Image (spheres, helix red, strand yellow):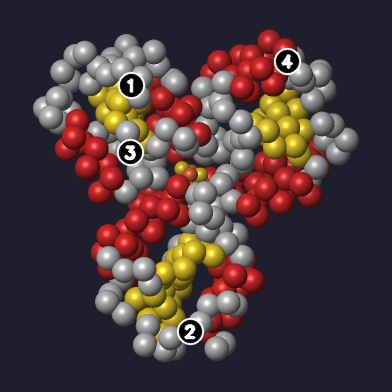
Amino acid sequence: MNIKLLKPYGYCPGVINAIKEVKKLRKDNPTENIYMFGRLIHNELIDSLMNELNIKVIDCEYDKYFEYINKLNIGDIVILSAHGHEKSLEKALFEKGILFIDTTCSWIKTIHNKILKHKDHEIIYIGKSNHIEAVTTSLLTEHTYFYDIQKGFINGRPITNNPYVFYQSTITNDTLNKALDDLKNNYEKIKAYKCSCPQCKLRQNILSAEINEKTFLILVGSKTSSNTNSLLEIYQKITKSNNFIIVNSFDEITKLEINPEFDYLITSGTSTPNKTVLDIFKYLRSL
Ligand code: SF4
């Protein structure tokens, strides 16, 4: 059978850094209560790691974290996730005297800094309104209007005719362009600032270039991961087929029935452990 593993695969640098910081925090603080606000990244395997490290994951709507802070005690430690947060959460932790570490990915911080430079201008933020990166980024400035990629504007809309546009780092070009086309009906001149995560974009471009009519896609990642879903969106748009499987662990791949007529292509989301991807590749190569 033909099988190819696309590179890069496995964790992106942002995820590697976040995991490293969390492990070090537990090592340096073996007995303290440690809480994670939100999932570190969207992968069930990382949720298990949090269990092993005895870190309590508080996964709720963003504004509920402010209420949760009131239940914490001096000496407790909070981890802020790789997807980002806005400054009032840090302020609330600081005021309560709670230590925290910030694992926000450097790319997300870059986007935040760009937005904050335009805090007095009207901004449209394009994203998925149930994704923590999008929720927290849209809260950075008072004049940001959230444009959900499914529902459109959800909290009012700009009144000036030249708002600046930013968007969620993991969405595809197609999704972005569709939203921009719609927005241009009312805001002719808008142009989006570059927000695509280079790691996600690279995987999306490489996948697009490798797909052919015989491709069967093996997508390794969590169904809850936005960048994994973007890879699937690209595959389905190009092939208009359902010749794919999403797996998040080695066991799941062993159930796949192999058809020698397909070319098997493996790619992965950025929150997928490298070992899982490699084990799947080696298994399929051995068949
Ligand atoms: S996918 Fe991109 S934005 Fe998200 S953690 Fe990785 S490098 Fe950062």
Horizontal and vertical percent for residue 3? 44, 81
Q: Secondary structure at mark 2?
A: loop
View extreme (right): residue: 31
| Amino acid of disc 3 | Gln
The mark tally for this picture is 4
- At 32% from the left edge and 49% from the top edge, which residue is drawn? 172
Q: Say which label, 1 or 4, has the lower sequence index.
A: 4
- At 25% from the left edge and 17% from the top edge, which residue is drawn? 158
Q: Is residue 202 visible?
A: no
Horizontal and vertical percent for residue 42? 56, 47
Q: Say which label, 2 or 3, has the lower sequence index.
A: 3
User: Which residue corresponds to mark 1?
Assistant: 145
> Between residues 58 and 271, which one lies in front from this camera angle?
58
| Amino acid of disc 4 | Asn
Q: Say which label, 4 or 2, has the lower sequence index.
A: 4
Q: CA distance from mark 2 to mark 3?
A: 35 Å
User: Which residue corresponds to mark 2?
Assistant: 258
User: Which residue corresponds to mark 4?
Assistant: 70
Classify residue 194 as left or right of residue 27. left
| Amino acid of disc 1 | Tyr
Q: CA distance from mark 4 to mark 2?
A: 54 Å
For marks 2 and 1, give the one nearer the viewer.
2
